[in-house]
């Protein structure tokens, strides 16, 4: 017992398959202990159980994402990231479409679980500009779809300029949401929820997805119209014929609606208060009573809201749609209605619970029934595990001939007086002996006294428990017909988005065919969903609500135990313990693990089954852990599978090391051979180069020796045949040629003609030095002569004056070199402009030698005068 009790420790039992003993009490106690330690995730094989903590936990950080990325499912603590990673790797590595099915009651945390799965996949999947864009748009779709309903009520007055109207004012909405009839039936806010911040988040998300500002405004306007429709009040009146009619009691709300959508108020008022009926090929306008008017108003509001939501979904899908030809693999995350059991359950709870029955049916078929049937097909000995098959409940609801939905549609289409009483009577007749259906009438027939079942109700024994449904409103909500006049009024509006939501309002597309009922549409949607889910590889997350009040870290054992029962967790654990946790076709199994045995590596020549048997025979696993089917290998314990994966990783590491070693050896040998070949080529070229240089040197030496020999021979012959004076004439000839060469070169390279330039080419030979100086002097004097000939008379006179000044002041006046460049002006004091000087000059004329300006000082007074 001590060893058994120790397994109940939360840290020890992360997988309920290992729980011993297996009872409802031990399972519940394990979940409670783990929840108390903030371990909200627990495994049943590869199924994840999530208990909602109703508070944030520090277990979703980027470090956690890296910890669970490419990990072994059973090698880490239970976490939602583990199943997300397992599904993603199956999608990526095994090319299998995946579906993560998230089920549980309302408030169990299904939506949050789906967000965590999508955020994890977005974090670990491949990168790229287009991929990142789609991931961001996908993650931002949740705030848009969640915020579409409360968006108008989260509007707040602008805190910026008072001149700019706030979005609330533009939509003609009031800040107090209790003013609106569709919102004042329950609390308008939740503690700790910042509506304004959520609204900004929704707007940012719409921008990221690709909504234009005009589209955002249009969505808010249509949502505001829905709210305002709930405030349209009708008053009763009577026509002259005595028939009851209705009219708009307060036109203000109607006027504001029409201003938002660009519609004539009279058109909308006629559509709300009257109805056009076709009788004998004649259109008759009939007035509506107040109840009929309210029915039409609410039907219009629901249709606008429903179609707007569908438009949002389609708009988001268009933004994140994969380009044609690029879609390869699919991962679906299903977060759908939770099972609902209220005090008063109506048509909405009926169809929601029907959907949950179908989801439970999938879980039964794909994790219980199919598992047992697969063992039978594979010829493996199996101990049958009894479980509840809810197909009988699904058939009770959806049977196309005598199901509850079929009977409801039949009542809606039947002519004459139709009400819920006739519908309930028909159900009582059809299902009087059905063990999962009961009503007051069937109980009386069985002589059962039950005061908890009213006469206007019927009860279905769902997998989640007994639910009592009140038939009041079933027929009305199933019909949910929208009067054609209202559709045509919406089509007549000038609001582009609203007009697109009601294509049937186009007068040219009028159809007399009745639209399908709500139940029929929902049943068809569920059938499509089930078909899609059956085509995927399922992964399960079962969410549990720990308490009814959504209090953080509060665990109510009675509530959790009820969910354990209707979720079928005990049956799931029994099957996992009695069956095999892993199975795979022999071919892929052998291909994946063949490196673990030297007899199957690198290739196995025989059949895949024989190879798998030989492979596992070389591994230390007990026979009871393995089973060999006709086409698949079965492994009982996840631990055995994990050990296989560990051995494979170690062997892959060894093989990788071997491959690296072989590659490095090949690379070194190849590099050595290339270096050796290069060295031989370099040596050959170097030796050739050395021999060529040696040959050239020897050739030059030979030529020099030959030249000296020929010179000696010529000189000897010269002395023999020429006179003694030949040398003087030869020297004279050479001298003349050198002088000629010097003069010709000098003529081609004369210096510039500027008199300031004193440069002159140097003499190539010393004997020409005197000639060079003489020629230089002659050339400079010639340049000066040419320069003087170009001077004007005034310039010549100025330079002569400068020359005389130079003779007087050169080497005698310190500032003379600086004044040399300044031209003579003759008069520096400006006396010629002085009137007194002009008068004196007129009298004295040429007799005036020198003049200057002075100032006179009065000796007596000391005053100065010019």
Image (tube, helix red, strand yellow):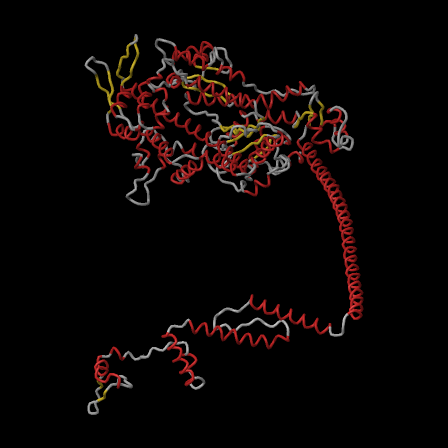
Quarter of the figure with the C terminus: bottom left
How far from the left and from the top, in percent, is residue 711?
78, 66
- Asked if residue 431 can be seen in this view, the reply is no
Residue 175, by quadrant, is top left
Q: Is residue 166 above or below residue 624?
A: below
Which sits in the foreground, 144 or 805? 805
Vertically, is 343 above or below 775?
A: above
Name the residue nearer the viewer: 190 or 549. Answer: 190
| Residue 344 location, quadrant | top left
* Number of numbered labels in the structure image: 0
Task: Please tell me which residue lies in front, 817 or 290.
Answer: 817
Residue 247 x/y as whole percent = 24, 22
Image position of 701 (left or right of 857):
right
Find residue 694 and report its horizontal and vertical position in percent: 79, 58
Q: Residue at x 48, y 27 (%)?
A: 336
Residue 369 visible from this viewpoint: yes
Q: Position of residue 399 (x, y in %)?
A: 49, 13
**In the picture, which quadrant includes the N terminus?**
top right
Using residue 375 as the reference point, say whether residue 154 is left or right of it: left
Q: Is residue 298 above or below residue 37?
A: above
549 to the left or right of 391: left
- 438, 686: nearer the viewer: 686
Residue 14 falls left or right of residue 844: right
Single out the residue that lies furthest toward the bottom: 860
């Amino acid at each position: 017992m001590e060893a058994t009790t120790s397994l109940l420790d939360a840290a020890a039992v992360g997988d309920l398959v290992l729980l011993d003993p297996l009872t409802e009490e031990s399972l519940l106690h394990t979940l409670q202990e783990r929840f108390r330690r903030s371990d909200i995730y627990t495994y049943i094989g590869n199924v994840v159980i999530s208990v909602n903590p109703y508070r944030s936990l520090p277990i979703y950080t980027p470090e956690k994402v890296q910890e669970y990325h490419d990990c072994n499912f059973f090698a880490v603590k239970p976490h939602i990231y583990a199943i997300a990673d397992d599904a993603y790797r199956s999608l990526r590595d095994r090319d299998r479409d995946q579906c993560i099915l998230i089920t549980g009651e309302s408030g169990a945390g299904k939506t949050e679980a789906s967000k965590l799965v999508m955020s994890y996949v977005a974090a670990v999947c491949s990168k790229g500009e287009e991929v990142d864009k789609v991931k961001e748009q996908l993650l931002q779709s949740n705030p848009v779809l969640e915020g579409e309903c409360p968006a108008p009520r989260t509007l707040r007055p602008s805190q910026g300029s008072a001149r700019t109207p706030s979005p609330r004012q533009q939509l003609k909405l009031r800040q107090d949401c209790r003013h609106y009839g569709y919102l004042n039936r329950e609390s308008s806010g939740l503690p700790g929820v910042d509506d304004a911040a959520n609204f900004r988040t929704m707007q940012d998300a719409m921008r990221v997805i690709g909504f234009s500002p005009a589209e955002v405004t249009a969505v808010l306007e249509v949502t505001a119209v829905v709210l305002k429709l709930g405030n349209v009040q009708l008053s009763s009146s009577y026509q002259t014929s005595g028939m009851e009619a209705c009219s708009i009691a307060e036109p203000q709300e109607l006027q504001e609606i029409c201003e938002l959508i660009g519609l004539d108020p009279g058109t909308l008022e006629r559509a709300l208060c009257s109805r056009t009926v076709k009788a004998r090929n004649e259109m008759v306008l009939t007035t509506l009573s107040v109840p009929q008017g309210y029915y039409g108003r609410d039907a219009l509001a629901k249709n606008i809201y429903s179609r707007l939501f569908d438009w949002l979904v389609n708009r988001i899908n268009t933004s994140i749609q994969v380009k044609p030809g690029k879609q390869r693999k699919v991962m679906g995350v299903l977060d759908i209605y939770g099972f609902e059991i209220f005090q008063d359950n109506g048509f909405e709870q009926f169809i929601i619970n029907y959907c949950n029955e179908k989801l439970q049916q999938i879980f039964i078929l794909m994790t219980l029934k199919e598992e047992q049937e697969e063992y039978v097909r594979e010829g493996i000995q199996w101990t049958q595990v009894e479980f509840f098959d809810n197909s009988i409940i699904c058939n009770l609801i959806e049977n196309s001939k005598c199901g509850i939905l079929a009977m409801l549609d039949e009542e809606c289409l039947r002519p004459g007086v139709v009400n819920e009483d006739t519908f309930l009577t028909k159900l009582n007749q059809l299902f009087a002996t059905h063990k999962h259906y009961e009503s007051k009438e069937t109980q009386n027939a069985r002589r059962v006294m039950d005061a908890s079942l009213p006469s206007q109700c019927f009860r279905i024994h769902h997998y989640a428990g007994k639910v009592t449904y009140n038939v009041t409103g079933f027929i009305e909500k199933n019909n949910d017909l929208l009067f054609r006049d209202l559709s045509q009024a919406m089509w007549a509006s000038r609001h582009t988005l609203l007009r697109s939501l009601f294509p049937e309002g186009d007068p040219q597309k009028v159809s007399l065919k009745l639209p399908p009922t709500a139940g029929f549409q929902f049943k068809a949607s569920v059938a499509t969903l089930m078909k899609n889910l059956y085509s995927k590889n399922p992964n399960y997350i079962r969410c549990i609500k720990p308490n009814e009040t959504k209090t953080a870290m509060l665990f109510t054992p009675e509530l959790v135990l009820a969910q354990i029962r209707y979720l079928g967790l005990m049956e799931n654990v029994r099957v996992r313990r009695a069956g095999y946790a892993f199975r795979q076709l022999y071919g892929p199994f052998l291909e994946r693990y063949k490196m673990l045995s030297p007899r199957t590596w690198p290739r196995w020549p025989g059949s895949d089954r024989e190879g798998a048997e030989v492979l596992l025979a070389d591994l230390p696993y007990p026979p009871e852990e393995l089973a060999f089917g006709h086409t698949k290998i079965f492994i009982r314990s996840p631990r055995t599978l994990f050990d296989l994966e560990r051995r494979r990783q170690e062997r892959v590491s060894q093989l990788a090391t071997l491959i690296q070693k072989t590659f490095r050896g090949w690379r070194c040998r190849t590099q050595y051979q290339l270096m050796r070949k290069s060295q031989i080529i370099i040596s050959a070229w170097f030796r050739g180069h050395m021999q060529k240089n040696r040959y050239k040197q020897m050739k030059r030496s030979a030529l020099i020796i030959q030249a000296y020999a020929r010179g000696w021979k010529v000189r000897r012959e010269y002395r023999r045949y020429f006179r003694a004076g030949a040398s003087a004439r030869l020297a004279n000839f050479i001298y003349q040629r050198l002088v000629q060469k010097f003069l010709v070169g000098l003529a081609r390279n004369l210096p510039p003609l500027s008199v300031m330039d004193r440069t002159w080419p140097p003499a190539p030979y010393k004997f020409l030095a005197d000639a060079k100086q003489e020629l230089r002097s002659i050339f400079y004097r010639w340049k000066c002569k040419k320069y003087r000939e170009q001077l004007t008379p005034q310039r010549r006179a100025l330079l002569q004056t400068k020359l005389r000044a130079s003779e007087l002041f050169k080497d005698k006046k310190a500032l003379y070199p600086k004044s040399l460049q300044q031209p003579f002006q003759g008069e520096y004091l400006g006396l010629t402009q002085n009137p007194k000087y002009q008068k004196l000059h007129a009298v004295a004329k040429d007799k005036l030698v020198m003049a200057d300006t002075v100032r006179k000082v009065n000796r007596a007074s000391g005053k100065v005068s010019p």
